[in-house]
Image (cartoon, helix red, strand yellow):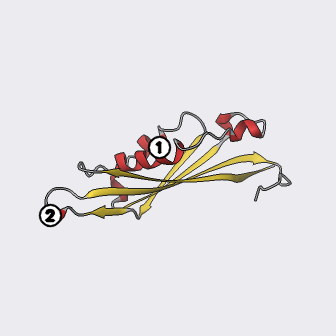
Amino acid sequence: MAFRRLLTEFGMGTSLRQQDYTQAAVRGVENALWHNSINLAELFGREKAEMKITVDVGVQQPERVDVAAVAAVFPYGAVTVNVVAGGLDVPRPEGAGNPTVMANVAISVALDVAPDVEGAA
């Protein structure tokens, strides 16, 4: 058997005033997850702990994201967090205060399934 990506979800999170890149990333993960309830592991007769979860986060200052805090959102599965330059810092009018931080997030879930599973690629 081989691990195959079976699901991808997208989200966006913000830190409106604190310029907290971790907070924006966590909110992006929550945005992606909280809009659905997919019992993917159970569908394939697997345990939730067997899922390989990859989280890709795009923010303007990747070094300011605490990857452990982002991974902690997930109660199960083997989580890998990758942070890259992306997202958006939105300046405040006339430079008043910190910019609003926007994080873009993509979550992919993979399971070890047979290669002939319909739709698995």
Q: Residue 49 at x, y = what percent? A: 65, 35
Residue placed furthest toward the right:
116
Label 2: element kind: helix
The image quadrant that residue 52 belongs to is top right
* Residue at left offset 20%, top offset 56%: 98
Q: CA distance from mark 1 to mark 2?
A: 29 Å
* Residue at left offset 42%, top offset 45%: 26
Q: Residue 4 at x, y = what percent? A: 72, 53
Classed neighbour count for the residue bearing mark 1: other residues with Cα under 10 Å, few (<14), some (14–19), many (≥20): some
Q: Which residue is mark 1?
A: 30
Q: Are marks 1 and 2 in contact (CB under 8 Å)?
A: no
Compare residues 104 and 64 and report the one nearer the observer. Answer: 104
Label 1: element kind: helix
Task: Work out whether mark 1 precedes mark 2 in sequence or the reverse, and give the earlier one.
Answer: 1
Residue type, mark 1 in image: Glu
Residue type, mark 2 in image: Gly
Q: Which residue is mark 2?
A: 95
Say if 37 sits above or below 100 in the image. above
Say if 50 sits above or below 114 in the image. above
